[in-house]
Amino acid sequence: MEFSAVLNSFGAMHSQFGGMLNALLLIFFRTLGFVFTAPIFNRRDIPFLIKLIFALFLTSAVFGMVPDATMQGPGVSNSLRFLILIGVNLVIGLIIGFIADIILKTIAAAGSMMNNQIGLSSAVIFDPSSRTQVMILDPLFAFLGVLIFIHLGGVFWLVRALKKSFVEFPLFAINQPLTSVIDLSYLVHLSSNVLLEATKLVAPVMIITMSVDIILGMVNRTAQQMPVFQLSFALKPSIGAAILLATLPIMVNAIAAFLETYSLIF
């Protein structure tokens, strides 16, 4: 009887260990998807090995925070279901990071709008983070947004969102309806408001540069011999840079207020 009890105890421990291993793998894949799309971590100039190591570290940190109720799931023998669960958790991690990245992309979009408005759309540089050519003010606004995001505790918001996802989306849930835990209309509102929010951030520059265009147009009508078109090439970038420097403290406060407003989704 004692030997049988030992075998039963060993079998229970083996089953529990298998369930914990399955949960650990699912947490890792969700965290890996999160790292690949979340701001700060999704830069292309960060090597894949570094992202993988960070995902492993984050998995070990989050593993102890996952509720016990979400640790219950199918055994290792159910391979098809387990592969589906890996895909589901990977997609959930990608979505969490993507939603956070949209918010910072709004600030970068403000830089693109300002480039076009002050006549610097043809001035491009190579961005190592995206490995593409971008307009000259895009990296400035993106870097400014990341700095403010980190200063406000954005990294902790991201980790909190990842931790909360294990409650809203259990590890072993496949047929859970998204509408029960995600407000899809809010996601549509968030993605569609990128242009509007970017316009608000650069509104002072846009208003003044448009006023300069109107004044130059009036000058061109009254003094047609004056080379207004050539004058605008030097005038608009100079005025735009001066306005940007003058309104930078206000813009920083506006970006901080914008990020704090959308931090509620985390």
Image (cartoon, helix red, strand yellow):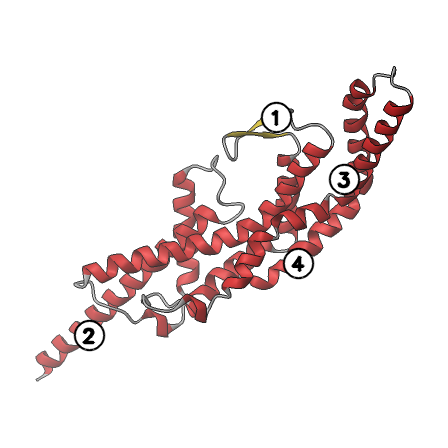
**Mark number, residue 260:** 4
Looking at the rendering, which quadrant does residue 26 occupy? bottom left
CA separation, marks 4 and 3? 24 Å
CA separation, marks 4 and 1? 31 Å
Secondary element at tag 1: strand
Q: Is residue 260 left or right of residue 131?
A: right
CA separation, marks 3 and 1? 20 Å
Mark in front: 4 vs 1: 1
Mark in front: 3 vs 1: 3
CA separation, marks 2 and 4? 47 Å
**Residue that protrudes farthest toward the bottom in the picture:** 1
**Mark number, residue 124:** 1
Point out the tag, 2 or 4, that comes first from the N-terminus. 2
Mark in front: 2 vs 1: 1
Q: Is residue 189 left or right of residue 256?
A: left
Q: Is residue 6 visible?
A: yes
Badges 2 and 1: C-beta atoms under 8 Å apart?
no
**Mark number, residue 12:** 2
Secondary element at tag 2: helix
Count residues near mark 1 (Cα–Cα under 10 Å), then give few for <14, some for 14-19, many for 20+.
some
**Mark number, residue 206:** 3
Badges 4 and 1: C-beta atoms under 8 Å apart?
no
Q: Is residue 178 above or below residue 9?
A: above
The residue at 80%/35% (across/down) is: 209
Quadrant containing the N terminus in the rendered view:
bottom left
Q: Check disc 1 and give the amino acid type.
A: Val
The residue at 31%/63% (across/down) is: 23
Residue 200 locus on image (x, y percent): 72, 49
